[in-house]
Amino acid sequence: MKAAVTLTTNHSFAAGMKDGTTIALGYFPAAITFGFIAQTTGLTVQETMLMSLLVFAGAAQYMALSLLAAGTGAIEIIFTTFIVNIRHFLMSASLNEKAVQDHPLKKAGYAFGLTDEVFAVASTKEGTVHTGYVYGVFFISYASWVIHSGVGHAVGQLLPEMLQQSLAFALYALFIALLAPSLKKHRKIFFLAALAAVLNSVFAFIMAEGWAIILATLIAATVLEFIEPLNNKYNDADQKNGVERK
Amino acid sequence: MSMELLFIIVGMALVTYIPRMLPLVFLNAKSIPPRLEGILKNVPYAALGALIFPGVLTIHENVLFGLTGMAVAFLISFLGGNLIFVVLGSIAVLTALTPFFNTLTL
């Protein structure tokens, strides 16, 4: 026990699990709802859990269910999933800036777990991010998502409707809680988030949600970079003190 | 298990995994120009803004539901509440107010 405590650094798997607990909590209602809708769409419990196990992407999985229910073809469903999830390409590139260099296979492993929420937690962490930490965040979130998808399939209809409605807010609360502390620290972060939110609201009317998010994020990140270049020194110093990058 | 559904699930898995994996595995963080590096470092905060809004307005027929939740979550965060407290606190407030949102139409 003593050894375990001393090994629990800020960068460890255990620290990642701890920070990921909030995601696991937020995924509970989302996965229960997914499992429940999957059941009403006619998926077996095995099919429901297999989708959560292999895809691990909340919004895209919901969308796949509604497309399946509407009798949409396989290729269209896969293509829609691609559009909805293409934003993770940008997040992966961004996390790569912050992540400690490691064996490509190890990074390829945690890349599987790069949902919006796992990315948000890992990338708002101070300083560099270690492989073990990302695996910790990923593991606990993934476990919650897969297990609760199965639970939702079995007992989803038992959740009172009133609670279902307010639980839908859980993941938004998580995003806000991750954003708020940085808003207080840097004026620039407020403008980044606000500009992306406004742009996304406009783009949402004229294009698919997946493209709207990626375009809004990219434009806001670029515009602010030219208006007010990031205090790179602060970040670089952080990284040099933290870990040596190969 | 239906073969078509299995095909769909595996296809979804591939198109989700590949974009998540490519930059992390093949981008060399050291060889990226400083401008691009600055933009990529901005991405988390811009992405959070876009992920929150306007999606938060559509979780309930009444847009006040999401707006109230947002206000409560920001308030608890600014008062220094940690992650779990923000999530549970805003859900508790929304649950208590749900009857209002369901009768009010906007």
Image (cartoon, coloured by chain):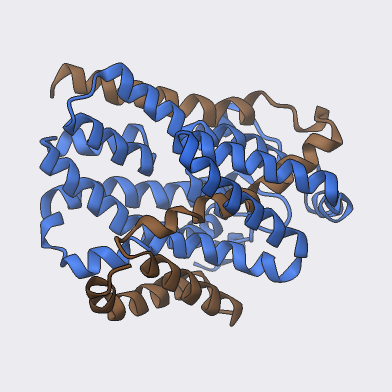
Chain colours: A blue, B brown
Residue A235 sits above or below residue A186 on the image:
above
At horizontal 61% and vertical 68% (from top left) the residue drawn is: A180
Q: How far from the left and from the top, in percent, is residue A88?
A: 53, 36
The structure residue drawn at horizontal position 31% and vertical position 37%, both measured from the top left corner, is A63
Residue B100 percent coordinates (x, y):
27, 78
Q: Position of residue B86 (x, y in %)?
A: 47, 73
**Residue at the outermost front position:** B106
Residue A187's place in the image compared with B44, above or below, is below
In this view of the protein, which residue sits in the foreground, B60 or A3? B60
Quadrant of residue B89 within the rendered picture? bottom left
Q: Is residue B106 left or right of residue A224?
A: left
Residue A243 seen in this snapshot: yes
Residue at (23, 39) in percent of width and height: A49
Q: Residue at x 36, y 69 (%)?
A: B65
- Closer to the camera, A162 or A126? A162
Which quarter of the rendering shows the C terminus of chain A?
A: top right
Could one spot residue A136 in this view of the protein? no
Q: Residue lying at the far right in this picture: please name it.
A: A233
Q: How many marks?
A: 0
User: Is residue A104 rendered to the left or right of residue A84?
Assistant: right
The spot of residue A68 in percent (x, y) is: 20, 30
Nearer the observer, B35 or B62: B62
